[in-house]
Structures are given as C-alpha cells and as structure tokens.
Amino acid sequence: MPSSAYAPTKADKFAFGIWCLQNRGRDPFGDQTRPELPALECIRGLAERLCYGFEFHDNDIVPLGASAAQRDQIVRDLKKAIDDWGIRPTMATTNLFYHPVFKDGAFTSTDPAIRAYATQKVMHCLDLAAELGTEVFVFWGGREGVEVDASKDPVSAAGWFRDALNFLCEYVLSQGYGLKFSLEPKPNEPRGDLYLPTVGSMLAFIATLDHPEMVGVNPETAHIKMAGLNPYHEFAQALDAGKLLDVHLNGQKPLRFDQDLSFGSDDLKEAFFTTKLLTDHRYEGTIGFDAHPYRTEADPWDFVERNMRTYKIMKEKVQKFNECREIQDLLKEIHGANPELGGMLTKYSVDQARKLKEMNFDVNALAARRLPYERLDQLVTELLLGVL
C-alpha cells in the first residue's frame, strides 16, 4: 500500500486540541524544550494537514484577563481563519485547573464563591463556543478531587458538581445554543484522587442530572489505562449507553502517570480494537487526539501526522479483519452454537419463563465445546504484523 493511501482527508474527522500542539515539552523534572506556538499558527498547521477540526480551552483562544475589546478582536480573527482555512472548532472546554484559584477544585471547591466563579467562567466559554459554531463542550474535572479525605464529604461534592451542571444545562437551553456536554473521566492526577474516575461512574452520575439527554461521556485512552482498565471496554460502555459524544485517543503505559503518548505507540492491538469499535459501530463524532509530542521534538507536526496515519492504518487493518475468511470462519464457529436459543432472553413473558425453567441442559456437553481463541488471537497478531 503506497504511503499516500494513509494521508488524512476531511472525511476522517480528525481533530487535535490546541493545547497538544502548544505543549512545550516541560515535565515535573525538566523545563521546556520548545517554544509555545500561537493558537492561530496551531490551527493553520492543522488545516494545512487536512484536519477536520481543532479543540480548545477558553484560555487557549482568549487569555485570562483579556478585555472585552481584546476578546472580540481575537474572535473576529479566529472566525476569519476558520472560514479561510476550512477547519471547524469541534470541541470546546474551560480551563478550570491551572489558576491557583482552583487549587482545591472548581465545581467541587468548598468555597461557594469559587464554585460560582467557575460556573461563570464556563458560561463565558459557552458563549464563545456557540459563537464559533462548536457542538460539543467537554468537562474534565482536573481539580475535582482530594488528597485529604477529611477535607470534604464526597456526597456533598457530588451535589455541588450536579448543581453546576444542572445550572449550565439550563443556561444552554435558555440561550438556544445547540451544545451538548461531555464529561471526561480520569482516576487521578493532578489530584491524589479525582471524583468520577471511570466511564461507568460518569454514566451513573449523568443519570442523576436534570437533563441527562444533554450530557454524554468523552473517554480518553490514557485516563482509562491509568486505572488499569481496558479502553476498548470503556469506550464500548459509553457507546452502548448512547453516550459516546467525543473521544480522546492517545497512548499510555498502564498504571503510570498521565503520559499522553501518541495513539498506538504503546499497544498496537489495543489501538486496533479501539479503531475497530468506532468503525464497526459507525461512531459519527470526531476522532480527537489528546496527546503530547515527545520532549525531543522541535515542533508538533511529525506528531500530528503520526497520530492520523496510525489511525488510518488501523482502519485498513479493521477492513482486512472483517474480510479475512479464516478469521470470520472462526468467529462463526465461536458464535454459532445453539442458534435456536439466540432470542430466548430478549423479551420476558410468563410462558417464556416457564419454558426456560423446564429446559434440560447438558452442562458437560456445553463445557466441552471447542473455543479456538489461541488461533483467533494469533491471526489478529499476524494481521497487525502484516503477515496475514
């Protein structure tokens, strides 16, 4: 396959956070290794590489403390750039974690003034997102957590978080904005423990909101692996619930600090199955990448092209998987037992329950059925290695 076959197109719906490209290579043990790119330069570079969209924090676009006049000029320049370069602002979010005012949380701060300020800051960003035509608004609660459990009651903190989201949903409705909210879980870092750490906990929380139909989940590969969980399964849980509004793909070694590696750089099989899930189930949202270039890089452009290329290669592998006769024959064998019972549990009735209770099962025969998973797994390995 020629290299050009993996070149991105707008139809791929790839998007990167501006913050990814502006990352300066700094870490807790070392200073920056490259300059920060201006936001418009980041957006132009993505457009030149045929990215569908970009994602942004409020302060990626409008610096904290900018005057109304400055804000309006920045927005005019940005809107012109969007039109000229043919790129979309696909996701917006609010920086509620960097400034020291959020040192003990934003929506879950023990200080009601800080909770009110955080909500106000989000309202301003919602106005900006709506003005630019953004459709998804993400909440990552980077400071919504604790190190000291004695400091706050988690039930009260959940209530404060809920109040803020309910208020903001009503604000969006009152303004007529076509925005939906997406919550991004993470188990820890920068706090010792973050609230709502997994997709499942987010889904349970969403069900308690006044407008759950307006709120979904934005899972991130690295955040899931930090908890030692399987991204394929976590993404699938959100998809099954009808709540997968946005995705953040990257790489991560399990149970480590948040590494934000490039997609597929750590586990090709995991990247393959994540891509397969999104492809097979016709996920229609953007393919967002939330990662950082290595500290060694002088600029982010090899990093951008690498992530898009890897996803395109994995999509081709998904097609080969679905077309491989040996793999599909094995799957038919694995899923082909007792087809007459396939719909047994799809709908309850008294008669169906009685019928089920009266059935006789040969447990030993069921246990003896061959399941050729070693062969299946090897075929996936060979597919990814280019042997198959």
Image (tube, rainbow, N blue to C red):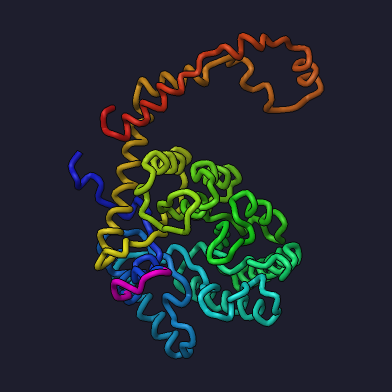
Residue located at (36% from left, 41% from top): 268
Residue located at (52% from left, 46% from top): 235
To which quarter of the image does residue 49 belong? bottom left
Count the marks.
Answer: 0
* Residue 35 on the magenta span: yes
Residue 2's x, y, as percent?
Answer: 18, 42
Left or right of 114 in this view: 324: left
In front here: 366 or 211?
Answer: 366
Residue located at (55% from left, 80% from top): 100
Residue bounds of the magenta highlight: 28-36
Residue 162's x, y, as percent?
Answer: 70, 65
Left or right of 50 in this view: 376: right
> Image height check: is 348 above or below 250?
above
> Image height check: is 227 above or below 314?
below
> Image height check: is 154 above or below 125?
above
Q: Is residue 1 visible?
A: yes
Residue located at (39% from left, 40% from top): 272
- In which quadrant of the rendered image does the N terminus lie? top left
In front here: 311 or 242?
Answer: 311
Q: Is residue 22 visible?
A: no
Residue 249's x, y, as percent?
Answer: 42, 53
- In which quadrant of the rendered image does the C terminus lie? top left
To which quarter of the image does residue 140 belong? bottom right
In front here: 28 or 38?
Answer: 28
